[in-house]
Amino acid sequence: MAQAFGKKFACCNPFKMKKARTQLSLPVLIVLFVTISVSAQDLPALTKGAWDLDVWTAGETGEENTNSFSESQILSAGFFVGRVLTGEHGKNWLRGNFEYAFGLTPVFETYGNQHIHGFGFDPVILRWNLARHTSRVSPYIELAGGGLTTNSNLPPGNTSSFNFTPTGGGGIYIRTGRRQALDIACRWSHISNANLGVQNPEFNGVQVSLGYHWYK
């Protein structure tokens, strides 16, 4: 009986239980410390004069000849280099600064009506970085325009292998470091040849992109 009582006491030994709780609490404390340390850092350096290098990938779906947004899909990837040109201007929720960038799209693949590839460029990317933010998240709105050349006419038919590619939309930066940020965006996407071809059908779709920024 004494032996059984000793085993029971050992199982309920408060010193062992305290040690176990300490071992379990250590990883939790580490996670909390890292979380607090990260959230306490400043937002990315989106101030006047900052350089912005971004690499991104995007997927989009839209219509070409029908009213179905599932008709054609595009997968693309590229990069852009931007420069914050102004300090903060404006009032209320529109307050922010202006960034100009240019971009290249070396990866462009279409699916659905046809499978072709191409190369795109955006000489004009106009981005307004909004001043309103949380400790980790900062939004922006954007307009961009460029061109696209493909190895076959896009959309298919008596159209053109060169098209213009205006886009517009917005997104959010999610800070991952003092000078790095994740970028999640949604844009309206348009592709047409402005009557360079005999026919000028349009691709209109919705694009979702994921990017990563380095600031200097």
Image (cartoon, grey):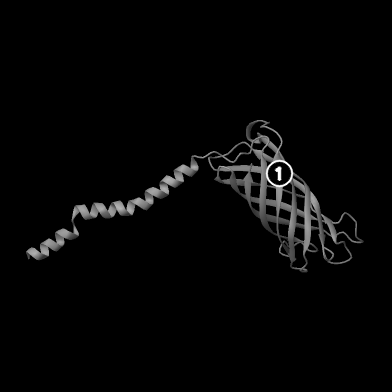
* Snapshot quadrant of residue 203: bottom right
Pick the front one: 200 or 145: 145
- Quadrant where the C terminus sits is top right
Residue drawn at point x = 85 percent, y = 58 percent: 162
Residue 71 horizontal/vertical position (percent): 74, 65
Location of mark 1 (residue): 82
Is 116 above or below relative to 143? below
Residue 197 horizontal/vertical position (percent): 90, 60
Residue 66 horizontal/vertical position (percent): 78, 63
Residue drawn at point x = 76 percent, y = 61 percent: 63
In the displayed structure image, the side of residue 195 where residue 41 appears, left or right: left
Toward the left, the furthest residue is: 1
Toward the right, the furthest residue is: 198
Residue drawn at point x = 67 percent, y = 47 percent: 53
Q: Could you say whether the residue bearing mark 1 is in a helix, strand or loop?
A: strand
Is 174 above or below relative to 196? above
Is 99 above or below relative to 68? above
- Disc 1 crowd, CA 10 A, few/some/many (<14, 14-19, 20+): many
- Three-letter code for the amino acid on which mark 1 is drawn: Gly
* Snapshot quadrant of residue 153: bottom right
State the count of labels.
1
Is 28 above or below relative to 47? below
- Quadrant where the N terminus sits is bottom left
Residue 112 horizontal/vertical position (percent): 74, 68
* Snapshot quadrant of residue 72: bottom right
